[in-house]
Image (cartoon, grey):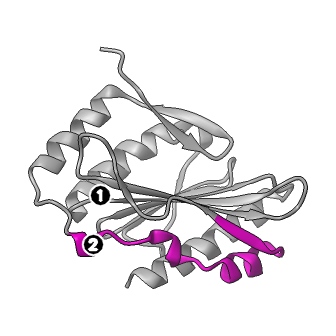
Amino acid sequence: MICKESIYMGSQTRTRPWWLQHVMIALSLSVPAISAAAQANYCSLLSTQEVAAVLGAPVVLSGDGSAKALPGTQVRSQDCKYETKETHKKYMDMTVEETPSPALAATLFKSESQIFGSNLGPQPISGLGDEALLYPASGSLYMREKNLCLHFRLSGYALSTETRVAVVKKLAARAISQIH
């Protein structure tokens, strides 16, 4: 079976293999549905002022107004794009995936971290969430906290690898502080 779902990742589009979609469905059937109260607007984890302060330029927020269910699963996803107003736009993208349980989030984290690019040299980092991987080559960070998986990406910035890493770490730490 060659069924794949596209996943937009900043400047790249990756595909989620058919088997991962089946794992997500099987796991989501074994846990209760996400309550209406848990259907949050995850873009509120980072204000435009906080992102602008870290990026050094005013930003506007675009993206999904709230988390949306992924077809055939109980996993909900929300994409938040913080974009500069410049002619050549730069942005920070944060994707949040909400699962019904921490166990499902751990499985999703493990599966998606393989998709995000083992060829990008992921490095485990401590101090951010339950588990986190940094992708220095792309300046992105993927992490899990409780029943949430969060992916942070910068695009359009001509920054050194060290600066990109520092920026995504700072924004991820701020977002995770709002979860507790």
- Amino acid type, label 1: Ala
Does 110 sit above or below residue 84? above
Q: Which residues are magenta?
A: 36-61
Task: Quickly name the residue at label 2.
Answer: 38
Q: Looking at the picture, how far across and down is residue 39, in whole percent?
A: 31, 68
| Relative to 101, residue 16 above or below | above
Residue 129 in the image: x percent, y percent?
42, 72
Q: Which residue is mark 1?
A: 105
Residue at image coords 63%, 76%: 170
Location of residue 66 by image quarter = bottom left
Q: CA distance from mark 1 to mark 2?
A: 15 Å
Q: Quadrant of residue 84?
A: bottom right
Looking at the rendered structure, the secondary structure element under dot 1 is: helix
* Image position of 38 (left or right of 130): left
Disc 2 packing (10 Å; few <14; some 14–19; many ≥20): few
Q: How many marks?
A: 2
Q: Is residue 80 left or right of residue 51?
A: left
Question: Which of the 4 image quarters holds residue 48?
Answer: bottom right
| Residue 15 coordinates in the image, percent (x, y) | 47, 31
Instruction: Give the side of residue 48 with respect to residue 107, left or right.
Output: right
Mark 2 falls on what kind of element?
Answer: helix
In the image, what residue occupies the spot 83% across and 76% down?
A: 56
Disc number lying in front (1 or 2): 2
Residue at image coords 37%, 85%: 180
Q: Where does the N terminus fall, quadrant-wise?
A: top left
Q: Residue furthest right?
A: 87
Classify mark 1: residues with Cα within 10 Å, few (<14), some (14-19) or many (20+). Answer: many
* Extreme residue in the front direction: 65
